Image: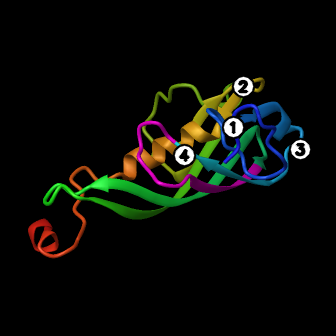
Amino acid sequence: MASHSDPLPSGPVQADQDPLDVDSVLQGKNPPSRSAQYRFSDIPSETPFHCQWHIERRAGGGIALEGHLAGDLLLTCDSCEQPFLQPIALGIDELYVLSQYAEGSQSREKELQADDFYEVVEENGVIDLKDLAHQYLVMESAHHPTCQQAPCESASG
């Protein structure tokens, strides 16, 4: 594992943040995909989580982000209180729209479509990919984890 003073070669990113410059994406200066390895201080794991990102410019001032986040959570069983590893694989799907293209408040009712759910971002802004991965991981984490080993598997059902 590289220390903070070691330069990160062309391999996966592992840092406190993983910034994605919005303007660079809109100008086509970013590669369409990138890999990263993340550790989170509030989410125990034995190894970093790996994320493969796909970044796409959208017509009309938007950015679509897709990611695949995988790793093993180090949890404590609620039944037997023993530590165990829980494999996790998540799909991340987010849409960002520049503030000048985002719709204002609608005065009429309308049926919501998939493209109506987006985050607003400034053209000179930054999207923190590590924070986005963290949000998805927190939402997916079990609230009352059980190791699924006998006798805990019968207690969880």
For mark 1, what is the residue?
A: 3
Assess disc 3: are there few (<14), some (14-19) or many (≥20) residues with their C-alpha within 10 Å of its C-alpha. Answer: few
Magenta-drawn segment: 40-56
* 52 drawn magenta: yes
Tell us which disc is closer to us: 1 or 4. Answer: 1
The quarter holding residue 149 reads: bottom left
For mark 2, what is the residue?
A: 125
The kind of residue tagged 1 is Ser
Relative to 153, 17 lies left or right: right
Separation (CA) of disc 1 from disc 4: 22 Å
Mark 4–mark 2 CB contact (< 8 Å): no
For mark 4, what is the residue?
A: 133
SS for callout 1: loop
The kind of residue tagged 3 is Gly
Relative to 7, 78 lies left or right: left
Q: Position of residue 81 (x, y in %)?
A: 18, 55
Please give the label number shown on residue 28.
3
Q: Residue at x 78, y 37 (%)?
A: 6
SS for callout 2: loop
Q: Position of residue 26 (x, y in %)?
A: 83, 38
Ranked by sequence position, the earlier of labels 1 and 3 is 1
Q: Position of residue 120 (x, y in %)?
A: 61, 30
Would residue 122 be seen by someone viewing this image from the given angle? Answer: yes
The kind of residue tagged 4 is Ala
Separation (CA) of disc 2 from disc 1: 28 Å
